[in-house]
Structures are given as C-alpha cells and as structure tokens.
Amino acid sequence: MTKKSEKLALATFTKLIRAAETISSCVHQHLSKQGLTVSQFGVLEALYHLGPMCQRDIGAKILKTTGNITQVIDNLEKRELVERRRNDEDRRYYAIHLTPAGRQCIAAVFPKHARKITEAMAILNPDEQQLLGSLCRKFKNLKV
C-alpha cells in the first residue's frame, strides 16, 4: 500500500463516516421524543416488518451484539412493547414478538421515520441514490 492510496482511503473513510453520522443524527432525532433509542427502534422495526424472531437474528439484522440486544429487548419488554415467547418445540428458544402496544408504537413512529429518510436522501437525485446504494453494497462481505 502506498502513502497516496492510504491517504485517499483515510480521507474517503472519514467522509463516509461523517456523512453517515450526519444523516443518522438527522433521521433519528425524532426517536428520542418517542422515548426510543436507535437500537430499540431497530428492534421494533425489524419485528414489525419481518415478524417474530429470536434475539440472535434480531441482533444480526440491526448489527448489535447478543449482549447488547438482550438489554435492548429487556428494556422494550419492561415497557411492554415486546414479549418473549418460549418455543413449544424447543424450550431453549425464545421468539420475540411485538405486543399490541409495540405494534401501535412502531406503526405510529415508522411513517415519520421513512419521511425523514426520504427527505435526507433527497439531497441526491435518484441516479445518485442508486449509485450510492451500489457502492455501499460492495462493502457487504467485508470481513472483520
């Protein structure tokens, strides 16, 4: 690796992270008004769109560790937005389900969230959004 390629990589990485942080801050700002963290919203949104899942699958979906996802789900359960249900066939397995209150919460919050994302991404025209999506997918299989 040359100094020039390293410098370019670092500058590009910094721009990518700053852009992502700016968009994330703008898009997620409304969640605190609903008493939700970004992770809690992620869990509710995943369950809302994909249905009941085990904690491990939820963690993988929203890119959180198993320890972190346990605490997020514990806090949602305390607020009666989700519930753990034991699987009848494998009693070691718990599926996380939205409660009626959880479904009502995410149904109320998600449309505003989608609007915020649409507004933030409108800085790019549709072709640029497609290109950015394609470029980001190149990182999909990056190994840590």
Image (cartoon, rainbow, N blue to C red):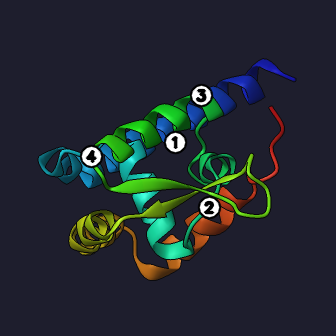
Which callout, 3 or 2, points at the residue further toward the start of the chain?
Answer: 2
> Mark 4 and 1 residues: CB-CB less than 8 Å, in contact?
no
Is residue 19 at all visible to an observer of this figure?
Answer: no
* Residue at the spot of label 4: 79
Residue topped by disc 3: 67
- Residue 61 is situated, as x and y percent measured from the top left of the image, at 62, 55
Residue 12 is at least partly visible in this image: yes
First in sequence: mark 4 vs mark 1: 1
Q: Which mark is residue 1?
A: none
The amino acid beneath tag 3 is Gly
Q: Nearer the viewer, residue 54 or 21?
A: 54
Residue wearing tag 1? 16
Real-space Cα distance between discs 1 and 3? 28 Å
Viewer-nearest of labels 4 and 1? Answer: 4
Residue 107: x, y in percent? 28, 74
Query: What amino acid is at disc 1?
Result: Leu
- Residue drawn at (42%, 44%), measured in percent from left and top? 39
Please state which amino acid type lies under the numbered disc 2.
Met
Judged by depth in the image, the label closer to the viewer, 4 or 3, is 4
Furthest residue toward bottom: 126
Is the residue marked by circle 4 packed among few (<14), some (14-19), or many (20+) residues within 10 Å?
few
Q: Secondary structure at mark 1?
A: helix
Q: Is residue 126 above or below residue 26?
A: below
Instruction: Give the camera-side residue of 67 and 122.
Output: 67
